[in-house]
Image (cartoon, rainbow, N blue to C red):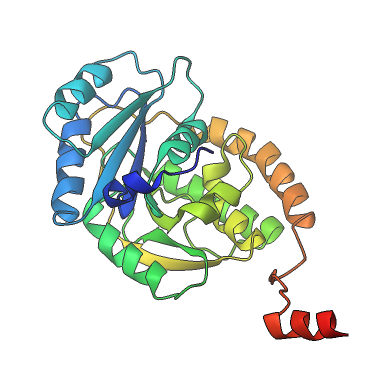
Amino acid sequence: MPKRSEKDTTNIPEISVLVPVMNEAGNIRPLIDEICETLSGRNFEIIYIDDASNDASPAELADTQAVISQLRVLRHHRRAGQSAAIRSGLLRARGDLIAVLDGDGQNVPADLPNLEQALLAGGPAHGMAAGIRAKRQDSTWRLAASRGAKWIRSSLLGDTHPDSGCGIKILQRDLFLQLPFFNHMHRFMPSLVRRHGGFVTGVSVAHRPRVQGTSKYKVLDRLLVGISDILGVIWLLRRAPRQGEVIEVTTSAGSRDSREKD
């Protein structure tokens, strides 16, 4: 990662909001306006990562970028998936805090301050504040599949977070960069954060029905792919670092002086 130059420090945002999208025309500008309203008065940036959309999303992003200075737009040449899109945004984000939310408009940006407050309540410790959807606006079949996935994650991974699939969350950038990257990793972030010694705080958030476009995930496909994902995460958790806190040991000037006299 390139080092941040000192002359740029005054322009570094406090928080970077990452929004991965693929074919979300119609949802883009309203969500960006909500983010700007929520973070008004803050030094922030919004990074949209367009995962090779083939609808009007690129045009909508270009039009919005022309009038909203905080908006940055990244575009994948080839479709790579949501986790890869989040990773692309993370590597280019400049904020010390990273917020992530889905680009379909179902997550509510107004929940971001509560998530940030919950994260910062942890003091200097590293961690993540993750949303728990109070009243999910999804189909009965999708809700049933989600309950099944939650049971599997809890049983096999020890994941106690009630809603690992919720897209809205905030965590420190340096912690996020330490997490192992793989396809679909965004679904297992509570387990991965704990693997690296971080805490996970759940925060009740709102959830809205989708008003534009269609979901990119098929329930059965997600369940089948999730089996291999869980096996991989089990492997990672069993090989988690065990060294605990790392402390740099220094020698005081007085001790050095005494040795030199001897």
Vertical order, 148 against 242 (above or below): above
Q: Residue furthest front?
A: 261
The reply to whether residue 39 is in sight is yes
What residue do we see at 41% from left, 67% from top?
Answer: 119
What residue do we see at 49% from left, 63% from top?
Answer: 162
Closer to us: 184 or 174: 174
Closer to us: 260 or 150: 260
Residue 6 located left or right of residue 151: left
Residue 33 located left or right of residue 163: left
Residue 33, horizontal then vertical, whole percent: 14, 41
For the C terminus, give its image quadrant. bottom right
Vertical order, 210 against 240 (above or below): above
Residue 150 located left or right of residue 19: right
Residue 89, horizontal then vertical, whole percent: 42, 36
* Residue 142 found in image quarter: top left
What residue do we see at 58% from left, 58% from top?
Answer: 193
* Residue 50 found in image quarter: top left
What residue do we see at 52% from left, 44% from top?
Answer: 186
For the N terminus, give its image quadrant. top right
Q: Residue furthest right?
A: 262
Residue 151, horizontal then vertical, whole percent: 60, 57
Closer to us: 90 or 57: 90
Residue 55, horizontal then vertical, whole percent: 28, 15
Total marks in image: 0
